[in-house]
Image (cartoon, rainbow, N blue to C red):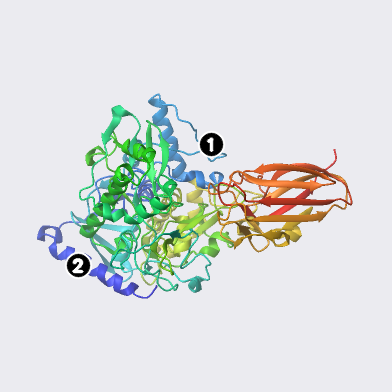
Amino acid sequence: MYQGAMAYMMRYFLAFYSLALLAPDSLLHAKSQEFDVLVYGATPAGVCAAVAASREGASVALVSPYDYVGGMISGGLSLSDGNQCARQLMGGLFVEVHERICKHYAEAGVKLNYRIDLTKNDKWTYEPHVAEKVFHDMIKEAGVSLHLEHQLVGATKESARIKTLRTSKGVFQAGQFIDATYEGDLMAAASVSYALGRESKKQYGESLAGHQFPKKPVKGLPFNEAGKPLPLLTGETPGEDKGDGKIMTYSFRVVISTDPDNRLPMPEPANYDPARFELARRYIKANPKAAGRMVSVDGYPLPGRKVDLNNGIGRQISSGLVGASWAWPEATYREREKFWEAHKQYTLELIWFLKSDPVVPEGVRRKFAAYGLARDEFQKYGGWPPALYVREGRRMIGEYVLTQHDVRTNPGKKDSIGISSFPIDSHDCQRVPTADGKGWINEGTIFPDRINGNRHGHPYQVPYRSLTPRRAECVNLLVPVCLSSSHVALSSIRVEPTWMMLGQSAGVAAAAAHETRVDVQQLPYDKLKQRLLKQKQVLDFPAGYKTSSIAGVVDSRKLPGIVLDDRTAIKKGAWKESRNFRPYVGIGYIHDDNAGKGAASLTFETKISKSGRYDLRLAYSPHPSRASNVPLRIESGGKSQEITVNQRLSLDPGSAFRTLKTLDLKAGHKLTVYLGNEGTDGFVVVDALQLLERSKK
């Protein structure tokens, strides 16, 4: 546990104790309700845990501090990132929920632009109210006892066993408990060890731990006339790179309507102060194209002529209120209400700034002026989503701590309860002035770490042990959301498809532990595995699945044909080395940092030893930020030809390369390949070239 965590735990205990003191006498002496399994937190993971446990024959209570069911999926997040996971490795209730969503639309006569096909990575989108209906239907069909607006007051234990859970409305007893909250509230109330914030690189030997600066710094004075950092900056320096209490930014997933008949006016911010956006104003004044691009929000089209707005991980200023997330996990419910409102007002202020400030180009102002909330969503809340996107809370320190190594290089586990494959992906953690005081920079971002040119990350098995606390601390609690992991590993775990999978497995395990009267740490895995498979969970890699490629490092010596690594190229201009995206050939790759256009080039040369037809292939890491128009010139035998390479396109299936051109080459001739960055519209990335002779038929 990082330094200071014990103080956090004590603060949280005192907060619970204060709530208990304020509870009425009738509550303190209330008769408890008894269940086999109690799930606290009606998040998607919580719903899946409750339904799965009930289907195993347990009596189940699903208890939530809020008045809605479904967490982020029914609270605004309408594209739940399954398109960035390896679909063939997904199953269970996550798939069932989406099948039910599709059935709902089919029965309503609405044609979707996708179908449930695990061989494709289509975007499975839905409207929040439809998702919430599906969750309620599943809860009702399973016979789960639902209890809303029950804020957690505390938990009582006998030795290492939780006996009762006390809320603002009642008392519950259960044999087994599951903490499915985004924050890890029940876990903390049960005095289970946890971490909060980021580990140092040294603690677990993680290259992506600690400070991360993948984003370019923004030029422009970050201070006001008094020499203080401007609003929207989180401090004067990033601090020492040795681990800290900072976590990734939160935001709302606002749903807007493009249908004038289903549109509510966007609320005006309560106390808009133009000075709050001076940082953005200076940025846009110096770079007018930044408005609507680097100062903007992401948007995903939904059924019903709606759009799901999200914080843009690649943008410099977006809908995430950077720094305001740090205190949320340890805060009381009353404090969280204030933080929730602060995030709402910031979101409204950002939209107001982009639609009204004179520095913003007129076209961008018109776009944001047209934003309006969806009338038929979140009707109890005036169209505003009730859920703040809590991307990261506490993280348990349990029987097994997942780290970057489990995600990237150690994918197999003997006690697998599911397979995760979302990329390691962290939003900004802080925003500070640059060291020279002439600009500012976002820190903590980890851009999606994908493999083989696919949308998904490194598939890896999640062990049951990562859901169990240390046995000395608690023997009847499972934690599928704030599971035992480092910040880096959680940056891969932290999406609803994975949490739903883990929630379902936790529900099955809790029911089995109650039925067999064993501690969760002693539950026989072979029996748990059989139960999970009956509930259609995917636990193992398919036969022939190449887990060896998960590490993402390709040894050029083992590749066929002629391989020219980037280290062998003649370089001109500024090229930066990197290993952030995998796979890569050799020890990494190089990129132009999306700067110095026209000044950077590479020249590869090789002599052809055998005449034949060769595929010319380029290794790079596809991404939307890459250039779509990289100029490449090929010279051999006195002939020259030019092509343009779109580095946003995926690589060849199962390969670290993409085939660019088929060439007829003669023995003894020299082949020269020239690649530059003149006029390119994004990052130019170069890892290696490969010449692969085509087989003769």
Mark 2 residue element: helix
Q: Nearer the viewer, residue 84 or 63?
A: 84
x, y (%) of residue 540? Answer: 57, 52
Q: Quadrant of residue 243?
A: bottom left
Q: Is residue 696 above or below residue 597?
A: above
Q: What is the x, y in percent for residue 54?
A: 36, 47
Quarter of the picture containing the C terminus is top right
Q: Which residue is mark 1?
A: 117
Question: Can I make out residue 166 in this image?
Answer: yes
The image shows residue 622 at horizontal and vertical percentages of 59, 48
Q: Is residue 131 visible?
A: no
Instruction: Check disc 1 and give the amino acid type.
Output: Asp
Q: Could you tell me which secondary element the residue under label 1 belongs to?
A: loop
Question: Alpha-carbon neighbours of circle 2 within 10 Å: few (<14), some, or many (≥20)?
Answer: some
Of the numbered discs in the image, which one, if any, rests on residue 405? none
Report the residue at 45% width, 50% height from top.
501
Nearest to the observer: residue 277 or residue 470:
277
Q: Position of residue 590 (x, y in %)?
A: 62, 59
Please, what is the three-letter code of the amino acid marked with disc 2? Answer: Tyr
* Picture disc at residue 17: 2
> Dot 1, how many residues are within 10 Å of its Cα: few (below 14), some (14-19), or many (20+)?
few
Residue visible at 54% across and 62% down in the picture: 406
